[in-house]
Amino acid sequence: MLPHLIYGGDYNPEQWSPDVWREDAQLMQEAGVNLISLGVFAWAKIEPAPGQYDFTWLDQVMDLLYTHGVRVNLATPTTSPPPWLVRLHPEILPVTAEGVTLWHGSRRHYCPHSSAYREHAAGLVKQLAQHVRDHSALAMWHVDNEYTCHFGECFCDASVAAFRRWLEQRYGSLDALNEAWGTAFWSQHYSDWEEIMAPRRTPASINPTQHLDWQRFCSDSWLVCFEDQKTILRELTPDTPITTNFMGFHKALDYWTWAAREDIVSNDSYPDPSDPEWLIGAGMVCDLMRSLGKGQPWILMEQATAHVNWRQRNTTKRPGEMRLGSYQALARGANGVMFFQWRASQAGSEKFHSAMLPHAGTDSRVWREIKQLGTELGRLDALLASHVQSDVAILFDWENWWALEQEGKPSNDLRLLPQIVAFYAELFHRNITVDFAHPEADLTRYRLVIAPHLYLVSDRAAKNIERYVAQGGTLLMTFFSGIVDGNDHIRLGGYPAPFRDLLGLWIEEFAPYANAQTNGVETVDGQRFTCDVWSDVIHLTGAEMLAHYQADYFANSPAVTRYRFGEGVSYYLGTALAQDGLAWLLDQVCEKAKIHHAHHMPRGVEVTRRSDSAHTWLFVLNHSDEEVRIDLPAKGVDLLSDAAVQTSLHLEPKGVAIVQLAAT
């Protein structure tokens, strides 16, 4: 798409005069910017009245940017319909589960099933694409913006009708739907499609399969909106890449499905700098984006230079932290670093959101850091063809996430992401790079697969995981896995029915803990750790016990097990271990899987690799406030300083090095 690493941000010239445009273009050139997102919220500017289009200002801006060496990631500005469309078609406005209409006055105020909205959006996109299709500045399409940010489920009558059509296509008959939904429970049997409603507010809990299908339907519905626009853009600009910006571990949309429809994955990342481990969460999101794109380069489309405006307290990134976060994205597979936004707004809801060019102008810390980063990125073209490799995968499935966190579980406090973060953090501290994988994906290249709380699992996924272990893989599975099928029906025959043979055990019952209740786990060699949240009451059918519970009616029964299955090994964790216990377990599992990590690294030092067919680049990021010394596996050259590096490296606090290692 571009012959260099992408560097830039979101630009909103409609908020400024042409004199400011000219200054912006010059400063972008000075900062090393080569790509700008344009037009994200410009519908009212482009189409000020129905069918009346004004592209004069857009032509001027795109011409100006191009003459200053800046290409355009052009947005379809459909995320915020203009007031005239709401006045003409108030039915486009979304409705909550309580029946409340959400009005114009902010953004994302439309229902994805509104025919009026989709017709006007398609007309706008067609006119825009026809007008700019031959412009030399056009580098990429940015469809809409952050789908389902703020609002993801519309319960209006049009949405209910669309839901019924979706269900009829999915099931084919009411008999099949009634079977899938288990409608014999609570007298919910349906005899006509018109009887089916969206899961609006009800006196008691909603049918869980109905709610699961609703979440699938909502994700699919927004994807149809994306595909509507993509079809137009592909026809008129067949060689221009198309993306839409994701939002990390965003629950509303199944990004596995979405990523397969994009030309390149892009993401908006806004971790909270007040969290002392915010770069762990940010790294986890980076690894997810790389995984969604099947290892191909992705783009960090938005991040903050300093602070956001929408938290209760908007702490700022301290000196060096913006640079660290940007290089972390590159280290984990990104080929582009961008920000929201280029110039800080003077008015509107986001006027206190930080920008590449802050209110203070060029005499500011943020601007100096932006210039430094742009200068450095301009020297890193060698990385463009490189990729990140991982020996470890964490299984992650949106449908499982949706089903797991519905109400009515043995413990409604069990949440998927905190458990995943606990595993990820331990691997992060060991500098072990992680992929995320769908349970039905090819797992053969991984030495270790971790399956946290795979509550909902398809037959295909269960067979895939079993085959992986049988052929020599190492699996670590945690409690409350293999419990239901794709319809959220219990898999009978004893927990976890599809994995009993694989794990060499069966689970008699669950014993969730009360709030603040804990237990203890003791390993076979006498180490003791705390556990909480949950305990499985486990019976062995071949597995060996690695640790047992210390207390309660299931004291001395297995808590952690290991079983040889085929050519591989499966581990099972029946409780939520404290972090030191999790560290002990991962040491056992990684040793068995022959997963090697960077020993003797100071705490707070992140080390990752990118490689191509000829070279390896070692990214070393010092998140700490202390100078550190790092031992390297070989000599090399630091691309950021052009300095030769021997077998050790000194990094200042918040320092970064990218060492091209010499061939050994």
Image: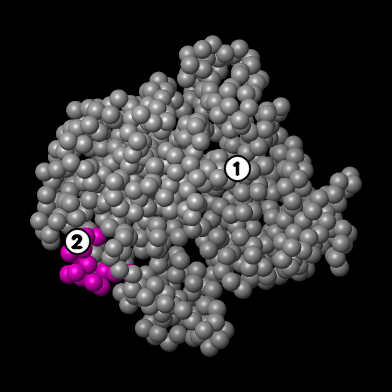
Name the spot of residue 310 as percent of width and height, x first.
43, 53
Against 601, residue 540 (above or below) is: below
Who's the residue at 22% across and 51% down the image?
42
Is the magenta region chiefly helix, strand or loop?
helix
Name the spot of residue 273 as percent of width and height, x first.
53, 43
Name the spot of residue 7 as percent of width and height, x first.
36, 32
Name the spot of residue 350 as percent of width and height, x first.
35, 50
Pick whichever of labels 1 and 2 is earlier in the sequence: 2
Quadrant of the image for the N terminus? top left
The magenta span reads 81-94
Against 369, residue 222 (above or below) is: below
- Can see residue 293? no
Q: Quick one: 191 or 618, which is closer to the camera?
A: 618
Q: Secondary structure at mark 2?
A: helix
Quadrant of the image for the C terminus? top right
Residue flagged by tag 1: what amino acid is it?
Pro
Residue for badge 2? 120
On residue 276, the disc is 1
Who's the residue at 68% across and 70% down the image?
410
Q: Quick one: 53 or 470, which is closer to the camera?
A: 53
Left or right relative to 105: residue 64? left
Asked whether 88 falls inside the magenta stretch, the response is: yes
Residue flagged by tag 2: what amino acid is it?
His
Judging from the image, the colouring scheme is one colour
